Image: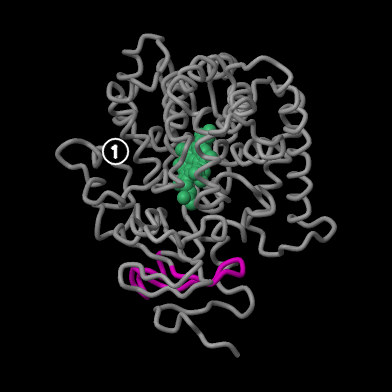
Amino acid sequence: MSADLLAHVPGDRGWPLVGHTLMFVRDARGLTERHRRRYGDVYRMRVLGREGVTFLTPQATREIYLDPGKVLSSEGGWSSSIGPLFRNGLMLRDFDDHHRHRRVMQQAFSRAALTGYVDAIHDVTDRHLRSLPAGDVDVYVLMKRLTLDIAAEVFVGVSLGEQSERVNQAFQAAVAASITPLRVALPGSTYRRGLQGRAELTRVFGELVAQRRREEPRGDLLSRLAHATTEDGELLPVDDVVDHMVFLMLAAHDTTTSTLAVMLWQLALHPAEQDRVAEEVRALDGAPVTPADHGRLEHTTRAMQEALRLSPPVPFSPRHALADVEITGVRVPAGHGVNVSSLALHRHPDWWTRPDAFDPDRFAPGREEHKQHSHLFVPFGGGAHLCIGNHVAEVMVKAIVARLLAGRRVTADPAAGVVIRAVPIPKPRGPMLLTVR
Ligand code: HEM
């Protein structure tokens, strides 16, 4: 038997063969909390065949995200879960190659590009909300449809229409496959359906990229990416643009859906907080939310931050040590995993007052609990892989909440017992019902 190179790290190896995978998939929050209580802020864990060390302090989070020695691979960290399904996406690239691609992609995320997306985001939102009847609605399902249509029109520049359901299914199959413990494409298996979903997305985006290349540049994200150039003035190969687009759907869609659902659900449960947000968004008087509005929408901003704190859409950032590395004094040998967990950090009792409570004012001047450390509140990550779409996400979430709450009120039953599964991207286990008036 090979030597246990993590013997110096507290923790256990979980079950034979699968390690902690099943517990992680079923209840990542519970598992993380149990390990924190038993072993402290640094412990070992074995998930999806990767054995590694999880760090729950902001100091370690900073060291891992900034990775001054360039020895922590994001590709190596993410490949065991999303690798084959979302291959060559930006998060699955490292160091110089990542930097080169990120610079090209940045052209689709510039301030000018974002300004161009704002109107389309509002148009799609208004269209959806016009047909929203008063009464009960599953807020997760509603937000999912809305964000998919926004992704289609704003990012891809098409109205997916009939294709929408097929694309959504292909996409969902790929996401579900990313955490299935059985990673063999047996007939009928989740993993096989995921790979088929990936193939379908590749086909759809392949046709669209080729079409955009034949046309004059337009304002949608796909067109911007299809026409973006490297420092040498060269276009990216079509396959690279396709891979980036498939990954962008993953990065943009379920993350914003989850943020919106959790935010609206919490506002429904906390009427006084909803009143503050409603008053603020009504003052916009129908004007669109722009990137410059974030200062004006201070209650909305804090409610969004609080939703991201309680239920971070990317609950873990895994990395793979390419060489021996020391993180806050703990040695991680080459070949092992290193995990950052916003899921645990955002509710760490050493840092937050009443960590499980929805309390947007913890972000307000005078309290600013998140400012105790630069890497305590990290919903969008940090360092080289910091979310490239964070401003798009902010505008999208606030625009939808603003349009919804300017003329409506939402309530929810506090006894409904909604349980949110944290990984791969937070999702309620059952219906998340809101009553809209
Ligand atoms: C509330 C919504 C969102 C949250 C919380 C979020 C969070 C994150 C986090 C934590 C990472 C880094 C993961 C890591 O370092 O391991 C990331 C990366 C990324 N996100 Fe987001 N994201 C959101 C929305 C979006 C949107 C709307 C887009 C695009 C339109 C997007 C595109 C990306 C991309 C391309 C990366 C990879 C960046 C890189 O590797 O350089 N995200 N996101």
- Residue 161 sits in quarter: top right
Residue at image mark 1: 360
Seen from this angle, which residue lies furthest bottom? Answer: 1
Seen from this angle, which residue lies furthest left? Answer: 366
Measured as percent of width and height from the top left, residue 66 is found at 37, 54
Q: Reply above or below: 224 against 352.
A: above
User: Crowding at label 1, few (<14), some or many (≥20) Cα neighbours within 10 Å?
Assistant: some
Q: Reply above or below: 331 against 93.
A: below
Q: Residue at x 57, y 49 (%)?
A: 429
In the picture, the quarter occupied by the N terminus is bottom right
Is ligand 1 closer than 8 angstroms to the Cβ of mark 1?
no
Frontmost residue, 278 versus 243: 243
Is residue 399 at least partly visible in the picture? yes
Q: Residue at x 58, y 28 (%)?
A: 228
Q: How many marks?
A: 1
Where disc 1 sits, the SS reads: helix
Q: Reply above or below: 353 against 330.
A: above
- Residue 298 sits in quarter: top left
Q: Which residues are magenta?
A: 33-53
Frontmost residue, 90 versus 250: 90
Q: Residue at x 69, y 36 (%)?
A: 237
Q: Is residue 145 in the magenta section? A: no
Seen from this angle, which residue lies furthest right? Answer: 187
The amino acid beneath tag 1 is: Pro
Measured as percent of width and height from the top left, residue 8 is found at 40, 82
